Image: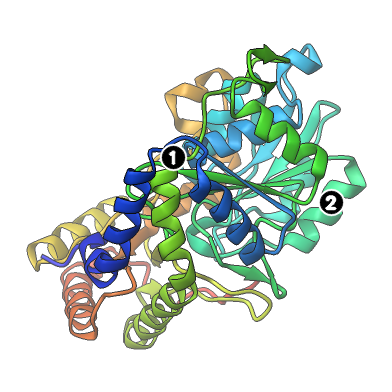
Amino acid sequence: MIPILDLSRQYQALATELNDALLKAAASTQYILGPNVKAFEQEAADFIGVKHAIGCASGTDALVLSMLALKLGTLHYGEPAEILTTPFTYIATSETMAQVGATPVFVDVEPNSFNLDMKQLEKALTPRTKAIVPVHLYGLPCNMNEIMAFANANGLAVIEDCAQAMGAEYQGKKVGSFGDLGGFSFFPSKNLGCMGDGGMVTTNSDELAERVRMLRVHGSRQRYYHEEAGLNSRLDDIQAAVLRVKLPHLNDFNAARQAVAQRYNEWLKPLAEFVTTPSVPADRTHVFHQYTLRLNTTDASVRDAIQASMRDAGVTTMIYYPVPGYSQQTHANLHCNPMDFPATEALRAQVLSLPMFPELTEDEQRTVVTALESAVKDNVSGFNRQPALEQVY
């Protein structure tokens, strides 16, 4: 079975370095905010091109800490601040807003980039809007020039959700360096993944960096003195040791993902009537955390049949994401109307992610493409039978 992801191959390639780093970290007994954390924070800040990188316990906590640092919760506003974001992403993006006492306001996405539709942002503004959380979905950066211009014009903070985009660039700058803060995840499946949970907040603001550092240790700058309610959210030194081994290889990992994506795009051209493959604007780099295509059908049952057929052929696929944020039970209190999000509603029935990881072989890719071709052939009647949509950004 060809998996959607195989972590064992990367581990085997780096086993000697990783095992040595793990043993040294274990022997040091400095497990909490130890020397590897401090060193990794500097190395990550240099890699991204920011003044500060602050390790934390997860990508989810990176968003929570960022929102608390910006004082976006009811504790500071007295009523929930509204935060504009995408419904087409993992639940952590909007879930964290609810956790700090803010209100997520969903904005529809572009059907080709899967990222926030700038034309929809203005419509979502209210006097309570305080921030935007753009998500660089699947590893493709958002249009950060337009987002930052919109935010600055309206006095809004920006928290970049970079969980899937470590190393991606927009106009020569890495994501996580544009907004007031950036949140990263080092979950094992990410482009830069550790051996458990881990996360990081980036910023160029000395003040915000100091607040994040305080908030990650129970709201304390001095031991036993607590200024406000914070979190216990520290990056383990052992995980930082793993990340320090992997970070120097990240550009190579991402280049390998891009090569895999390029082959998919080329080999899937004969299916252009049935599938729309990812396209990357010239002003940014896509690091392909996922390789996600669109099936040219509005019938989710066709996608389900294709997924089942590929599984029978020995190929694993995934759907990221079948349930948008506005349809999640946790956000039922928002009373959103799915019809207000036509692009997201279409995508939830169309997207299909193929196996994607740096070590995926060409032979394996050939098998994936052959399985998809066969599955499409068996389900031709369910397609719209129209050419792929023009890629417009």
Q: Could you say which disc has been placed on residue 150 in the image? A: 2
Looking at the image, which is closer to me, 81 or 231?
231
Amino acid at the residue labelled 2: Phe
The answer to whether residue 4 is seen in the rendering is: no
Judged left or right of residue 77, residue 18 is left
Q: Picture coordinates of residue 72 (x, y %)?
A: 74, 26
Q: Picture coordinates of residue 378 (x, y %)?
A: 15, 70
Spatial separation of the CA atoms under disc 1 and disc 2: 37 Å
Tag 1 near tag 2, CB within 8 Å: no
Which residue is found at the position 72% from the left and 42% from the top? 132
Determine which residue is flagged by label 1: 236
Judged left or right of residue 183, residue 355 is left
Q: Secondary structure at mark 2?
A: helix
Amino acid at the residue labelled 1: Asp
Q: Could you say which disc has been placed on residue 376 in the image? A: none
Q: Quadrant of the C terminus?
A: bottom right
Q: Picture coordinates of residue 261 (x, y %)?
A: 40, 78
Q: Above or below — where is 303 with respect to 291?
A: above
The answer to whether residue 268 is seen in the rendering is: yes
Looking at the image, which is closer to me, 39 or 304?
39
Which residue is found at the position 73% from the left and 28% from the top? 82
Please give the count of numbered marks on the rendered protein: 2
Which residue is found at the position 27% from the left and 59% from the top? 19
Judged left or right of residue 54, residue 49 is right
User: Comparing marks 1 and 2, which lies closer to the viewer?
Assistant: 1
Q: Above or below — where is 71 with respect to 163?
A: above
Q: Quadrant of the N terminus?
A: bottom left
Looking at the image, which is closer to me, 304 or 234?
234
Using a 10 Å C-alpha cutoff, classify the residue at mark 2 as few (fewer than 14 neighbours), some (14 to 19) or many (20 or more): some
Quarter of image, res 383:
bottom left
Identify the mark nearer the N-term, 1 or 2: 2
